[in-house]
Image (spheres, rainbow, N blue to C red):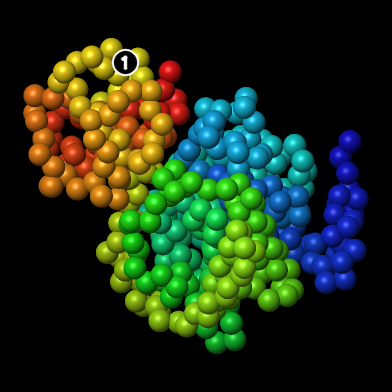
Amino acid sequence: MKPTKKQLFKRQITLSEIGEVGQKKLQNASVLVVGCGGLGSAIAVYLASSGIGKIHLVDFDTVDISNLHRQVFYSLSDVGKPKAAVLASFIKERAPFTEVIFYNKAVTKNTVFDLISKVDVVVDGTDSLPTKFLLNDFCVLKNKPLVYGSLYKFVGYVASFNIPQQENFSTNLRDAFPIMTTDIPNCEVAGTLNAIVGIIATFQINEVLKIITEIGNPLQNELLIYNSLNNSQLKIKLTSNFTKEKIQKIFDSESYFDENCKVQNANWLISSAALKKKLSDENLEIIAVLQNLKLPFQVHQTIPIQEFEAHKMTVDFKKTYVIVCQKGLNSYKATSILKSNFPDLKVFSLAGGIENYQ
């Protein structure tokens, strides 16, 4: 049975601020959701359920067992499958009036034009700082609204950037964070509570719906900071400092490359089985790049990824180095750093991390 639009969206159309006119705006809208993790998966499902006509999902990653505590639209049977494909299939089952397409690759400077140029609103559901700045800068250059969200432990950040105003556009991400720092730990390193993920996702959904239906007041020219431990909210006022011309210069020179978003070199990986065979080798040195990591074997040293500086390390070319972390992302980053400084060094990242060590 396929319901009618009036049946499916009855409660929403009943809102006088929405009505059939607002519902038609949603049906005619296209939204790009970048990142199908904790934020993006919830955002995509809720937007489709609200009646957005076209949703484009982008994510290069696959479902991991550690995702499930906060990425609630995936199940155990989805582990190992592409997130974007699984999420698109889920949406198609419950949103008959939404066209869903997906892209199983990371957003790069080379692909961003084709992804963003034809949509009405871009939603940032990523945990990659380079990708966040890439989306922001390109949205500024192409006059596209960007609904921003990010997380750190129990705290979330939300804003609607680059919203059309009477004579110009509202502030953008660089007005809030001028420098793209690289030392902020992601959720693998810092951890996150599932409740704050859902809270920030629904804040972002709310922003998209307001922007498209043109009701209420989007979070423009301000950054909302929500702390879930004490339920406090803080709004920081933003002023425009980064013009389109200034951002064009940044865009022309910046690569926006993120080590965690690239396909890992199989020659730099070691499997659990292969590592087990080497554990008794006296020429093996294991380095953990996360502190307080629960390990089934002893490590020789722990160097947090934020402090991993190859030029300060003394290496032994007779040894084989294995870098470990929780999921295999930061360990691969550390392996890349060592390979860049010592190309002939035998160094490997534990594939899949400790959580997949069997």
Q: Indicate whether 114 appears above or below 252.
A: above
Among the 4 quarters of the image, the one containing residue 226: bottom right
- Judge left or right: residue 237 versus residue 337: right
Q: Can you give x and y, in whole percent of width and height, for residue 46 in the image?
A: 71, 51
Q: How far from the left and from the top, in percent, is residue 64? A: 52, 32
The reply to whether residue 122 is in sight is no
Name the residue nearer the viewer: 33 or 274: 274
Q: How many numbered tags mark residues here?
A: 1
Q: Residue drawn at (37%, 72%), measured in percent from left and top?
A: 178
- The residue under label 1 is 276
**As drawn, is 134 to the left or to the right of 27?**
left
Q: Residue at x 34, y 76 (%)?
A: 246
Q: Secondary structure at mark 1?
A: helix
Q: Is residue 243 visible?
A: yes
Above or below 294: residue 255: below
x and y percentages locating residue 31 in the rendered image: 62, 56
Please, which residue is most extreme toward the top here?
A: 277
Split into 4 quadrants, where in the image is the N terminus?
top right
Q: Residue at x 70, y 68 (%)?
A: 210
Apparent side of residue 60 relative to residue 206 in the rendered image (left or right): left
